[in-house]
Image: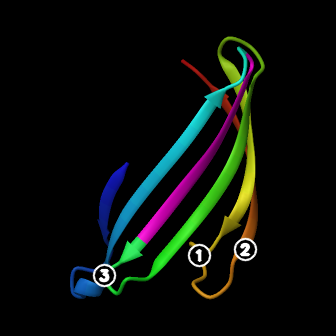
Amino acid sequence: MIGIRHTDFGEPEKIVTLLNTSLFYHHSRLLTLGVELNSEISTRKLWRYRLTPQIHYSISSDKAIQVGGGPSNLDKMAKTDWLLTVRVMRTF
């Protein structure tokens, strides 16, 4: 996915290019492995990112658990944080 975010219409440097890329490998019917990279690039050429390796495990035909984690500096430019993400998904 590629997109543009404009948070402050009074300042042109607040325009940010968004780039979200992901790669998934279906290991089996129940298990999917993947990695997701969410990037933000400002007009001042500042790059911020969140890298999330992840595992998706199917509990049933309509439910799955997603677990992932990795480095991120989306919230703070100077410091890299380590995040853990857990989601329970249901297909309708």
**Residue range of the region highlighted in magenta in the rendering:** 30-40
- Identity, as a three-letter code, of the amino acid under mark 3: Thr
Query: Percent from the top left, x then y, of residue 85?
Result: 73, 51
Q: Quadrant of the C terminus?
A: top right
Identify the residue at image location x=23%, y=84%: 12
Q: What kind of secondary structure does the magenta stretch mostly adopt?
A: strand
Q: Secondary structure at mark 2?
A: strand
**Is residue 33 in view?**
yes
Residue sitting at the far top: 61
> Where is mark 2, residue-wise?
81
Query: Percent from the top left, x then y, of residue 20?
Result: 45, 53
Identify the residue at image location x=74%, y=62%: 83
Q: Quadrant of residue 62?
A: top right
> Where is mark 3, residue-wise?
43
Q: Earlier in the sequence, mark 1 or mark 3?
A: 3
- Numbered tag placed on residue 75 in the rendering: 1
Q: How is the image coloured?
A: rainbow
* Image-based side of 84 in relation to 2, left or right: right
Query: Percent from the top left, x then y, of residue 70?
Result: 72, 60
Q: Is residue 38 magenta?
A: yes
- Identity, as a three-letter code, of the amino acid under mark 2: Asp
